[in-house]
Amino acid sequence: MAKILYEVKQNQNSSSVAYGKWFAQVKTLETLNTRKLAQHISEHGSIYTPDVVYGVLEKFRSCLIEMLLNSKKVKIEGLGTFYCTLENQKGGAQSKDKFNVNSNLKALHIRFLPEQATEENISSREFIKQAEFINVDSLMKGNENASSAPSNDGTTGNGGSNTGGNTGGNTGGNNGGGGDDEPSEN
């Protein structure tokens, strides 16, 4: 089973309704760049060299951006769909004819929606079933029983603790009061 490391942090956002509460956050060990991912893919029984895989991934990246900038969604079967959303300035325009892209738009975002077809479902509710969770604090203490798998009631099993909260993102959840913002990495 895949192992997801997490740490429990307190919400320090005093304007949040969850101020002072504790939430789990993923502890990332490494960020793979395109070269490292290409090397990893080629080591999985692929007939393609890391350079060939790298070339395909780079072409994918540039074509994905091209398609998104042409108002197209890009669906990768078994993975999910990439698409764009607009972020408007607060308050909006007074009327339709007074809307101005330069003054009313704040940002153009790339979003990702995981595959949700039953045979390839990697949505949040299904993805969590494929992971084993390990609290990094228990690793630091040398606790061999640091891992915990989710149970059907949302708590963790195998002696773990229920850390509560969810990671939110665009669904309005809570990652310690950060809303859409990524939690800081330590």
Image (tube, rainbow, N blue to C red):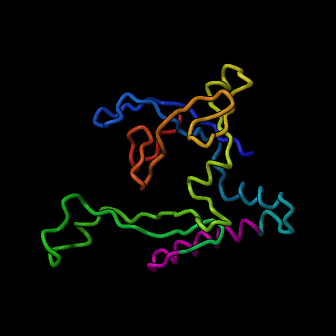
Q: Residue furthest front?
A: 153
**Residue 39, quarter of the rendered image:** bottom right
**Residue 49, quarter of the rendered image:** bottom right
Task: Name which residue lies at 66% across and 67% down.
Answer: 78
Q: Residue furthest top?
A: 141
Task: Name which residue lies at 60% across and 69% down.
Answer: 61
Residue 116, image x and y in percent? 58, 65
Asked if residue 125 lies in the magenta stretch, the reply is no
Residue 55, image x and y in percent? 71, 70
Asked if residue 63 lies in the magenta stretch, the reply is yes
Q: Is residue 175 left or right of residue 129?
A: left
Q: Nearer the viewer, residue 160 or 53?
A: 160
Task: Name which residue lies at 81% across and 61% down.
Answer: 42
Task: Name which residue lies at 52% across and 64% down.
Answer: 113
Residue 87, image x and y in percent? 33, 62
Q: In this picture, which residue range is highlighted in magenta?
A: 53-73
In the depicted structure, whether residue 83 falls above or below residue 179: below
**Residue 63, quarter of the rendered image:** bottom right
Q: Is residue 71 left or right of residue 157?
A: left
Q: Taken as a whole, is the magenta stretch helix, strand or loop?
A: helix
Q: Quadrant of the N terminus?
A: top right
Q: How many marks?
A: 0
Q: Is residue 168 left or right of residue 60?
A: left
In the depicted structure, whether residue 5 falls above or below residue 122: above
Residue 133, image x and y in percent? 65, 38
